[in-house]
Amino acid sequence: MSTAHPSTGAVSESVRSVTEAATDGAAGDLIAIRGQIEELDRAIIHLIAERVALARRVGPAKRALGMPILDPPREAAVVRRASALARDAGVPEEDVRYVFWHLVGLCRRVQLGEEGSA
Ligand SMILES: C=C(O[C@@H]1C=C(C(=O)O)C=C[C@H]1O)C(=O)O
């Protein structure tokens, strides 16, 4: 940006450099924060894989005990617990419940041998 008025030119230039510095700072922040999010996503996927591996072991244990794989009271308890943990952590309980219903469903399908690529 430039100005036609010589007396305000310097001020205008310095406003521009401050604005650009702020924009550069924000862009740097965005890249850094996105990098951290990607690291967390990697960790979350590894945790999901660990949970799936444990669920795979629960299947034979239940069969040995003559228990059905589907255990609705246990599933409800798992989701209730996740909801309480979400509340304590200050994140929206309803969304966490939604995520956990899907996670539990995935683990149940693994036990039933119905999983896709898992
Ligand atoms: C893993 C289990 O089996 C199924 C999956 C559950 C889960 O992912 O938490 C819970 C109950 C079951 O329907 C279990 O019983 O612990």
Image (spheres, rainbow, N blue to C red):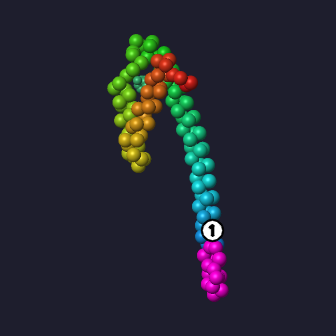
Q: Position of residue 61 (x, y in %)?
A: 47, 17
Element carrying mark 1: helix
Observer-nearest residue: 41 or 58?
A: 41
- Residue ID at (64%, 82%): 4
In the picture, measured across the screen, residue 80 lies left or right of residue 59, that is left
In the picture, measured across the screen, residue 2 lies left or right of residue 56, that is right
- Residue ID at (34%, 26%): 73
Q: Quadrant of the C terminus?
A: top right
What type of secondary structure mainly makes up the magenta span? helix
Observer-nearest residue: 22 or 37?
A: 22
Please say whether residue 115 is one of the residues in the magenta stretch.
no
Q: Position of residue 47 (x, y in %)?
A: 54, 35
**Residue furthest out toward the left:** 73
In the picture, measured across the screen, residue 53 lies left or right of residue 21, that is left
Range drawn in magenta: 1-16
Residue 76 lies, with reference to residue 15, above or below; the image says: above
In the picture, measured across the screen, residue 31 lies left or right of residue 109, that is right
Asked if disc 1 is less than 8 Å from ligand 1, the answer is: no
Q: Position of residue 90 (x, y in %)?
A: 41, 49
Observer-nearest residue: 1 or 69?
A: 1
Please say whether residue 10 is one of the residues in the magenta stretch.
yes
Residue 2 lies, with reference to residue 48, above or below; the image says: below
| Residue 92 visible in the shown view | yes
Res 108 → quadrant: top left
**Residue furthest out toward the bottom:** 7
Q: Which residue is mark 1?
A: 20
Res 105 → quadrant: top left
- Residue ID at (60%, 67%): 22
| Residue 82 visible in the shown view | no
